[in-house]
Amino acid sequence: MTTSPGNPTAPSPFGGERGELLNALAEQRELLLITVRGIDDAQAAQRTTVSELTLGGIVKHLTRAEQVWTQIIAKGDGELPEGMLDMEQYRMADGETLAGLLEQYAAAVRMTEDALVGLPDLDRSLPLPRTPWSPPETVYWSVRRILLHLIRETAQHAGHADIIRESLDGSSTTAQR
């Protein structure tokens, strides 16, 4: 395991390319966690822009992203993981708490890293699940490309979260580092 319990942003003990990619992903996760630090559940569920996105919804979506891509890596069968297309992953449901969502995120991060521990290399090619936007032919991505996608997805949504947080109370990730 590459993180300590409760710390989804600990540096990877892997060296080489795998370690570099995992460290880049950990840095983006850390930025997201800084952005949600110190807010309550009502703030986590609050829209601050014309977008439907909320801080809690972003954490929930990135949790699902880690879970889905881990399943794709672990199974390698091209089947659509459960919940991949569930639009409820983008919003906090009634009764959900930010603390609960962050616990789920930390667990998903550990699952992702555990799935990568046993892989001999990042070149393994996997079929992607068919989605409504997929081309007619099966698309294959390497584990490396999946990791790069997770880095991009996390970075993009960490940026969204920073804008939402600034609109919420004026805080920014940069100022909180």
Image (cartoon, grey):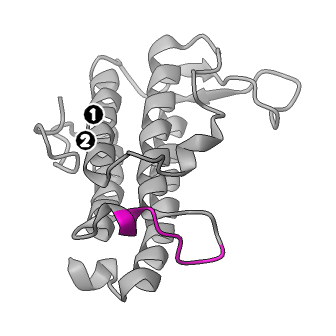
Q: Nearer the viewer, mark 2 or mark 1?
A: 2
Q: How many marks?
A: 2
Decide if residue 21 is on the left or right side of residue 135: left
Magenta-colored span: 42-50
Decide if residue 53 is on the left or right side of residue 130: left
Closer-to-camera residue (104/69): 104
Above or below for 150 versus 27: above
Specify few, some or many for label 2: CA neighbours under 10 Å numbering under 14, 14-19, or 20 or more: some
Q: Residue 149, which numbered label?
A: none
The residue singled out by tag 2 in the image is 103
Name the main secondary structure of what is drawn in magenta: loop
Q: Quadrant of residue 138?
A: top right
Contact between labelled residues 1 and 2, with CB atoms less than 8 Å apart: yes
Q: Would residue 49 be counted in the magenta stretch?
A: yes
Residue at 42 percent of width and 81 percent of height: 168
The residue singled out by tag 1 in the image is 107
- Placement of the C terminus among the 4 image quadrants: bottom left
